[in-house]
Image (cartoon, grey):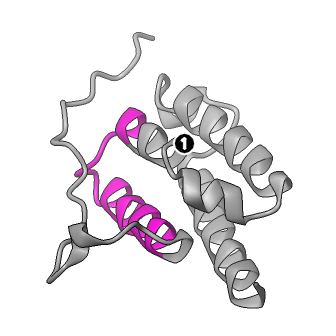
Amino acid sequence: MAPEKRPVFPAFQVPTGPGFYNRAMTALDQLNTLHAALQQLRADTLGVAAFSQLAVQQKTLAATLPPRFFEVLGQLLNRLESSALFTEESCSFSQQDLLDSLQLWIDKAQLQLQKS
């Protein structure tokens, strides 16, 4: 069966507000951006490739969290990108389960940031 063709999605919309661009993004800002992107991914308004690219660009977050966090995130992103190539029935793991795992990763990252 041929891979499902997915429409091209617009780029992720970064949250804005008064003075948002006048300061460096903190790790928590970047985590919130990643969470908003996950919601867009779930709503099918952001593609998997765009989400993955955004996730790996969160350098302040990566520097703040223990290295193991980004090892796990990398594994989740690899599986998510692989799952996007196949239909739900032909993939060995569920894209919905991967999105749930990404939410769990975000929740645990937030707890880790609160400890810091």
Q: Residue at x 64, y 32 (%)?
A: 78
Residue 106 locus on image (x, y percent): 61, 70
Does 55 appear above or below 28?
A: above
Q: Quadrant of residue 97?
A: bottom right
Dominant secondary structure (helix, strand or loop) of the stretch shown in magenta: helix
Question: Which residue does the numbered mark 1 point to in the structure image?
Answer: 56
Which residue type carries mark 1? Val
Under circle 1, the secondary element is: helix
Whether residue 70 sits left or right of residue 54 in the image: it is right
Q: Residue at x 57, y 39 (%)?
A: 80
Answer whether residue 35 is magenta in the image. Answer: yes
Whether residue 57 sits left or right of residue 109 in the image: it is left
In the rendered image, the residue lying farthest to the top is 2
Whether residue 25 sits left or right of residue 62 in the image: it is left
In the rendered image, the residue lying farthest to the bottom is 114
Answer whether residue 48 is magenta in the image. Answer: yes
Instruction: Write down the region rendered in magenta.
Output: 29-50
